[in-house]
Image (cartoon, rainbow, N blue to C red):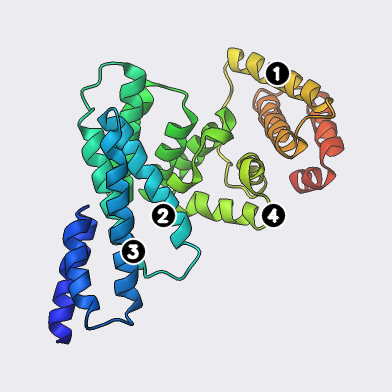
Amino acid sequence: MGIQMSENLTKAYGFLKAGKPEQAKQLLQTEAETALDSKDILFALNCCHFMINSLRQIESAEDFFERGEIIINEWKSFENTASRGNMPQPILYSARSGFFTLALENYSKMANEQDPRQRSEICRKIGLCYKKFGEYETSKNCLIEANELFPGSAPILAELADCFALCGEERKAKVLFREAFFLDPQKIDFSFLDSELICCLIRKVSDKGFTGAALQEWVPVYGVLFGIFSVKRELRSQEVGRLKQDIYAKENESKDPSSDSSVLTPRLINLYFWLIDHYVLTGAEQVKINQILLKIKILDPAIYSLFVK
């Protein structure tokens, strides 16, 4: 009986991994009749039910891209629930593969999209699916194409950085993570990032009590302080002008009593870090650097102490 049960469970997990929850459910229900107290089988059945309900939701979607989006969002919802308990990882992996297999099927049907921006987003999502399968080189190629079609996208650069880290190309990963968080931390979906390089940083910052939008903003600040965002580049002249404008705008915003300092403070500190790097790389007078350091000290003395030590 044990051997037969093992074979059936293997087949069931295979169906789940392939995005075929109905077939997996049938085998699991048969096994549940003789193993009512099996937590693994009950969790696997829960995965099947959730996936079946998710598939029902895409029936009214207008196009294949929207279907892919619904499936991925459903997975994020399920993963958030599952992460609260000590769930069997092999089953969770099978369920994740199933969701992203279904998402990939839908995104791939939009691969001939002509609009560069929309095609870029499709390439990004196809790359995400391959990354979740562990096919990092294929994922990287998709994300490189996405970046070529629509440069300067924080989500694309963050996910491409994640791929480089997973492929062992840490220096490139550090450069791109730093760029992505400089562009817009709020557009980076942490649930799409898998490399230990960035996940370890996110955990450390989260352990300091930051959550939500504030967490997104503090990650690049501590990325600098912990030496992770350590690879710098010289800014182009137009980037310097835009950086100074951003700083000016954020400084004025911070004077408004109704502004959200939990988000604004780390964003401003990160902009200051970039300006200091620019001054250092271009050999600017020390007085300019000292002026920015003083601003950081006034804004957050603790961060200042960590930065200059």
Residue that carries the numbered disc 3 in the rendered image:
46
Front one among 80 and 229: 80
Residue that carries the numbered disc 4 in the rendered image:
209
Say if mark 3 contacts mark 4, CB within 8 Å.
no
Callout 2 crowding tier (Cα within 10 Å): few <14, some 14–19, many ≥20:
some
Under mark 3, the amino acid is: Asn
Q: Earlier in the sequence, mark 2 or mark 1?
A: 2
From the viewer's perspective, is residue 268 above or below residue 46?
above
Q: Position of residue 213 (x, y in %)?
A: 63, 40
From the viewer's perspective, is residue 234 above or below residue 85?
above
Q: Taking the image as drawn, is residue 197 in sight?
A: yes
**Residue at horizontal 27%, vertical 53%?**
52
- Front position among marks 4 and 1: 4
Q: Earlier in the sequence, mark 3 or mark 4?
A: 3
Quarter of the view holding residue 162: top left
Q: Secondary structure at mark 1?
A: helix
Query: In the image, 168: left or right of 283?
Result: left
Front one among 243 and 155: 155
Residue that carries the numbered disc 1 in the rendered image:
244
Residue that carries the numbered disc 2 in the rendered image:
78
